[in-house]
Amino acid sequence: MSSATLSSPAAVQAGAGPQARAESLRIRQRAYIRAIFVLDTVVLVLAVLGAYLIRFGTSEPRGRGSDISYLIVGPALVLVWLLSLKLLHCYDDRVLGYGADEYRRVTSASLRLAATVAIAGYIADVGVARGFLALSFALGIAGMLVARFAARKRLHRARSRGAGWSRQVLVVGDTAHVLELVHTLRREPYAGYEVVGACIPDALLAPVPQRLGDVPVVGSFRGIPDAAAATGADTVAVTASGELTATRLRRLGWQLEGTGIDLVLAPALTDVAGPRIHTRPVAGLPLIHVEAPEFRGARKFIKGLVDRSLSLIALTLALPVLAVIALTIKLDSRGPVIFKQVRVGQGGKEFGVYKFRTMVVNADALLAKLAASNETDGLMFKMRDDPRVTRVGKFLRKWSLDELPQLANVLFGHMSLVGPRPPLPSEVARYDGDVARRLLVKPGMTGLWQVSGRSDLTWEDGIRLDLYYVENWSLAADLAILWKTFGAVVNSRGAY
């Protein structure tokens, strides 16, 4: 994918109207979709070619399936695979660049095709080598996920810089709901929504121009189309307000027809992932049904099985590294190698979490003297240059190596690989009703808090991310978080 595809701002001129801006954004989106299609094609061709070379090398196929022409099978598999991705909406611009659904669709389409090919081959008694097919699908799925992840990162960087990739949004609603929606959209600029103004109820307008924070108030509910045109907005986002009745919203939709300005509705219910939301038309009303969070059942059982299996494999492979770290800690300072601390797990049950010791042995006794130096809000204590941390401890914390013994906690069933941060009993004692929902699932070695900044997060943001995970967890999201954890660790973001 060329850098010009993502970053060239030539198509968006300053002061362009909403129709021109919306058309420019659609052109960029179509270019991005074409780039993703090209990436998928290249990946699948390389996967099929690689599978052939691994399975047969440079020699002619022998045994069962040797009479099959892989010069036909290979290209046919690539074409059918691309068709399957298209039919299952893997190139839908509503999911490209947003959430885990893009990866879930790619994986689902590929596995369905693999099952179809296997069944069809068995029924038709076609002698294509099973090793070739297994390698093709394994390499293809992994390659497409990595390629799409890299493309998404470039897209997010382009959106964060502006560069014509973000929608210009006019927010409409009551003051409190407008501020909340503005904060939500600005919290993740890579999502591609830039707020340019707000419209609030007539009664709240003053004779002089107003601002909500740094967002200009450009009009009332009676002049929303004019306000959108004046600010160059290509999207009107309507949030909650008692004055925005169904009739007014319907008329607003009519007024925006043919202007190139999109109308989106932001429900008051936030932090709910897409898979839990279903829209059903009832008596002409698009009722939004929200499924309850899933805290037990087959998917939870599978998650636990995956956690324990991966932790056992990781512990086995990491034994030499664990031994070297243990020896280094022992040589650096006196005290035990493993630090065991009481934490609170699922259902409020306490357990001992294992870590490599990174502080001096009397660290807890020194905490009271350092309380005034706390650099975070909320219930946690964080200090960037904590004098209790040893020399080896600073290195281990920077690369998150001190948390490797927690693989044993996962193996014993106290923790998951992905979940909320395991809290201290003193923190849990001060939880209110909302924050206590973190205890409905097992705590994790990593989580949304880990890949979003770790110690750099505020207490409020950390809790919000933990609660979002509790409500919306999925196996696909877990895999995405595990993948992002490697990037967070390598970059040492928020590690101290």
Image (tube, helix red, strand yellow):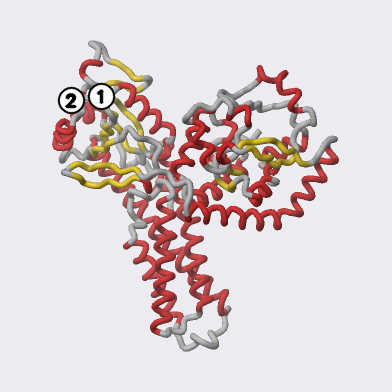
What is the secondary structure assignment of the residue under circle 2? helix
Res 148 quadrant in image: bottom left
Instruction: Mark 2 or mark 1: name the one nearer the start of the chain.
Output: 1
**For residue 56, which quarter of the picture?**
bottom right
Residue 153 at least partly seen: no
Q: Quadrant of residue 310?
A: bottom right
Tag 1: amino acid = Cys
How busy is the neighbourhood of tag 2: few (under 14 within 10 Å), some, or many (20 plus)?
few
Where residue 178 appears, as percent x and y from the top left, is 32, 26
Classify 54 as above or below 172. Answer: below
Is 473 on the left-hand or right-hand side of 369? left
For the question of whether residue 42 can be seen, the reply is yes
Contact between labelled residues 1 and 2, with CB atoms less than 8 Å apart = yes
Whole-percent x, y for residue 290 in the image:
34, 43
Q: In the image, is residue 339 above or below residue 196?
A: below
Placement of 57 over or under 262, stated as above or below: below
Q: Say which quadrant the C terminus sits in.
A: top right
User: Callout 1: few (<14), some (14-19), or many (20+) C-alpha neighbours within 10 Å?
Assistant: many
Q: Amino acid at mark 2?
A: Gly
Q: Residue at x 51, y 66 (%)?
A: 138
- Is 489 placed left or right of 480 in the picture? right
The disc placed on residue 223 is 2
Q: CA distance from mark 2 to mark 1?
A: 8 Å
Q: Position of residue 457 (x, y in %)?
A: 54, 31
**In front here: 28 or 393?**
393
Q: Residue at x 35, y 33 (%)?
A: 194
Circle number at residue 199: 1
